[in-house]
Image (tube, rainbow, N blue to C red):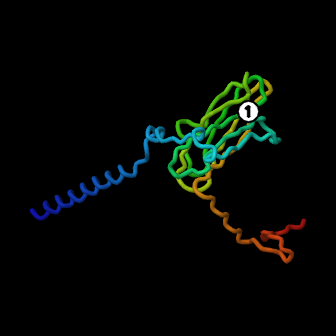
Amino acid sequence: MRKYILLNLAGAAVVAASLFGASTATAKTTQATPEKLEAQIIKTSELPTADVINYPESQLYQKPGAPVRYSYSIPKNIEIGQAITFNLRLSEPFQSGSLQVRSAVRGDVRLLSNSGNNDFSMSGENGHDMNVTFVANSAGRHYIQFQAISDTAQGTRARAFSIPIQVGPKQPLPVHPNLTTTATGETIISMRAVEEVR
């Protein structure tokens, strides 16, 4: 009976040690709180010009949908875990109505503090500024996707676009397994197909 009690006590000690060990390890890997991230945010507007890539508004947009154009600046080098704030400027030709902007992410990136979601009145000035804050959790190419919806007396129209977020150096694309070069030096991708004659 005494051996049984001692074994139970030893087992309980091992379980307790593993629990306390796990809580210590968990504490070390806990993600930074939103308050800590807010204190470490890198603002694109405060970086030297040489460290920023500017994407000016394009005048060549011809697709159907809302005639909403955009421009932004983003750091040339983005590291894993950095909190980055950039300014997204939207412009539109309307004299009245509202503009609703919603965002989502594709890839291993997250938006902070409901970032990327705004509502604007389209009366008056045609330019609208919004700050977008994100954190990339891994290297690679990620995207922040936006949908701008204009609501006027003429109806509701939408414009969708995405902003690429490159974290770390660009990785070369893998070579397609069916890539071949013809006798004339032309590079083609050869694929099997079944032709159905009716």
Task: Report the side of 139 relative to 39 (left or right).
Answer: right
Q: Which of these two is toward me, 130 or 108? A: 130
- Quarter of the rendering containing residue 193: bottom right
Q: Residue at x 80, y 70 (%)?
A: 187
Q: Measured along the vertical axis of the image, is residue 117 above or below residue 51?
A: above
Of 124 and 24, the residue lying toward us: 124
Q: Which residue is mark 1?
A: 91
184 or 189, which lies in front? 184
Classify the position of the C terminus by image quarter: bottom right
Q: Position of residue 41 (x, y in %)?
A: 51, 41
As drawn, is 123 to the left or to the right of 21? Answer: right
Q: Badge 1: few (under 14), some or many (20 or more) residues near its Cα, within 10 Å?
A: some
- Mark 1 is on which residue type? Ser
Residue 84 position in % (x across, y down): 55, 43
Task: Name which residue lies at 57% across and 50% down.
Answer: 78
Measuring from the top left, give residue 155's x and y in whole percent. 78, 28
Q: Secondary structure at mark 1?
A: strand
Q: Residue furthest bottom?
A: 183
* Camera-nearest residue between 78 and 172: 78
Provide residue 112's location: percent of width, then percent of height: 53, 39
Residue extending furthest right? 198
Check the image and report above or below for 146 versus 3: above
What residue lies at 66% left-to-right and 46% top-to-bottom? Answer: 53
Tell me how many marks there are. 1
Point out the image quarter for the N terminus: bottom left
